[in-house]
Amino acid sequence: MLRMEELFRNLPRLETERLILRKMRRSDARDLFAYASNAEVTRYTMWNTHRTLRDSEHFLDAIEQRYREGQVTNWGIEYKSNGKFIGTCGFVYWAPEHHRAEIGYALSAEYWNQGIMSEAARVVLQIGFQKMDLNRLEARCNLENIGSERVMQKLGMTYEGVIREQLFIRGRFESVKLYSILRNEVPVAYGSN
């Protein structure tokens, strides 16, 4: 099993048919701003809509700091056909002593409803079960976030229920739906070992 610092300091580059998952960098700021400035994209996120390019630069500076410190964080998603940075996918937390982690993600609205986030999240889940020695992987979404919930379902995750008023976001309490997948369910979900 990898130690947290090893994995996130040396975040491996992952590749799928359409995507490259890689470390984010400051040069991604314009592409990040293009989607993070869209209120529809940030409607259900924990972070605010970016108002200026500087907001996106600050966000990327913080992510780069997390990489340097080996803290739990996300991969940037690059769309192969045009080289654009279009979103993020990765871990929200990792509790190695409990063999449990949670994933989170965000995607440019231009790429919604194309199976892109399911494609990205699938390889992140594989890292969790193969390299992080997870037994349980969780994901949460706002009650109205149907798109995020569909991703969880496509990943073969099981709906566990509503966690009432779990988060305080933008001045109000939010309830979330909780999904999870266990190590022994992965072969069924992905059709392989």
Image: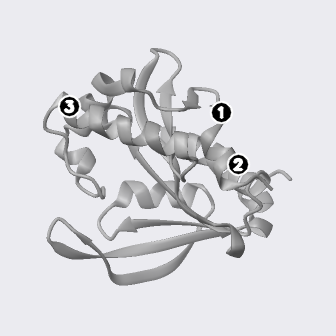
Q: Earlier in the sequence, mark 2 or mark 1?
A: 1
Give the residue type that dot 2 points to: Ile
Give the residue type that dot 1 points to: Leu
| Vertical order, 50 against 152 (above or below) | above
Coordinates of residue 17 in the picture (x, y in percent):
64, 27
Q: How many other residues sit within 10 Å of disc 3, few (<14), some (14-19) or many (≥20)?
A: few
Q: CA distance from mark 3 to mark 1?
A: 28 Å
Residue 121 circle label: none
Q: Which residue is mark 2?
A: 127
* Residue 15 at least partly seen: no
Locate the N terminus and report the quarter of the image it occupies.
bottom right
Residue 14 circle label: 1
Q: Earlier in the sequence, mark 3 or mark 1?
A: 1
Residue at image location 17% in from the left, 74% down from the top: 172
Coordinates of residue 37 in the picture (x, y in percent):
19, 37
Give the residue type that dot 3 points to: Arg
Coordinates of residue 188 in the picture (x, y in percent):
77, 61
**In the image, which is nearer the foreground, mark 3 or mark 1?**
3
Viewer-proximal residue among 34 and 98: 98
Residue 54 circle label: 3
Viewer-proximal residue among 190 and 8: 8
Q: Earlier in the sequence, mark 3 or mark 2?
A: 3
| Vertical order, 130 against 26 (above or below) | below
